Amino acid sequence: MVLSQESTPDVVNQGCYDFHLSELIRQRAWVEIDQNALSHNVRQFKALLKHDTDLMAVVKADAYGHGAVRVAQMVLEAGATWLAIATLGEGIELREAGIMAPILILGAINTPEEVRAIIHWQLEPTLCNAEQAILFAKTLEKQAKKLSVHLKLDTGMSRLGTSWQQAINFVQTVKGLPNLHLASIYSHLATADAPDRTVMEQQQHRFEAAIADLQKHGIKIPKLHLANSAATLNGPKFHYDLVRVGLGLYGLYPAPHLRSQIDLKPVLQVKAKISQIKMIPPGTGVSYGHQFVSDRETRLAIVGIGYADGVPRNLSNRLQVLIRGEWVKQIGAITMDQMMLDITHLPHLPVGEVVTLIGTDGDRAISADDWANTLGTISWEVLCGFKHRLPRIII
């Protein structure tokens, strides 16, 4: 329906800034973030955990496209106690917004300048090898500072981290360096979303073997964490002291077979408005390359959203959207800023009508999973694709 005073809150939130209804009406397209759904998802995951297992909310990549600052604030209010990001810049953004919860940087840090920034902003880095640890120690010594660090073991992801077989040397090196406080040891699972648990359990076995070796050498074990969203849903044996939950917080399931384990609510909806309506005769080409040619008189709606906003061009002629609870086909090539819809079966729609690209309208819904299945990709990529020129509106 057309955006109206009756259908929209008086004040909404864009990132961490409030703006009024009159400004929202001028938006051609936007992303809505459902605070109640996000809080519900946090509580659902908290209910799975033991009282001494903390929830680390993964808010990297702008909270998977949802808006990192506001999402971080909301998940902390709902019960998360840690935050995880991928880059130094993401951590600084949260600190500048006044967020003081512990923040783990999951990515690698390799320069003294980055180390000094981490010290200044009180972030907690991941150390992937002994060379990094030495760099940190030297920089900290010059700064006369101490820093909590987290050590990553590679148990089968073949990405960041020191091999689990070399855990003893790695941990001993870190513990022997001044000014480094060992806060946690962790690893990351490569196949936690697969129905076959063989590889996941092999990785856990390697992780626990490394920890057992450390204990035999008299090394006091700090906090341990292994589970992402999927592993968290695979049961308490994977939970340890922390779980790192990303996709699940945003209301999407990491795998179909895990749906029965928890009740999640999608947090994000993507909406846009019709900017023009026209009639085209049979035989008329639509958009670049005329990938679609009308075979009848067609009522065409032009909608102000495109691939520069995060709607993949490969969805052209394959995308369906919702208007007033009805399915509507997208036709022609999706362009940088706009797309076209066939609204012939909805003759009374006006300019300004709201189109739901992802979300619920009436008793029908479109999810990021639907887009991912059409594109042959994963929902993570779909969510992270929505660009910053779409305002994030907290409802």
Image (cartoon, rainbow, N blue to C red):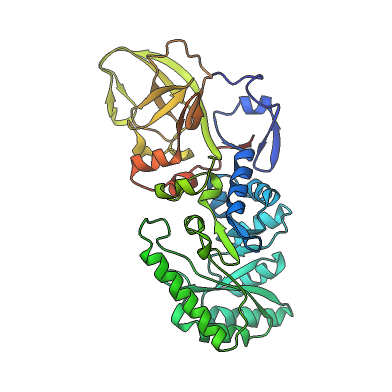
Name the residue at 57% across, 86% down: 173
Q: Where is residue 62 in the image (x, y as percent from the top left)?
A: 57, 50
At horizontal 47% and vertical 57% (from top left) the residue drawn is 234
Quadrant showing the C terminus: top right
Q: Residue at x 62, y 73 (%)?
A: 149
- Position of residue 31 relative to residue 347, above or below, is below
Instruction: Answer with left or right where residue 221 lies relative to residue 368.
Output: right
Can the viewer see residue 291 in this picture?
yes
| Point 63% across, 82% down: residue | 220
State how many labels appear.
Answer: 0
Viewer-side residue, 239 vs 356: 239
In the image, taking residue 55 as reference, residue 373 lies left or right, namely: left
Q: Compared with residue 340, is residue 104 higher up or lower down, i.e. above or below? A: below
**For residue 313, which quarter of the picture?**
top left
Q: Where is residue 339 in the image (x, y as percent from the top left)?
A: 41, 28
Q: Left or right: where does residue 48 sit relative to residue 18?
A: left
Quadrant for residue 116, please give it: bottom right
Residue 158 visible from this viewpoint: no
Residue 37 horizontal/vertical position (percent): 60, 40
Instruction: Please name whichever residue, 83 or 354, is drawn nearer the observer in this view of the structure.
Output: 83
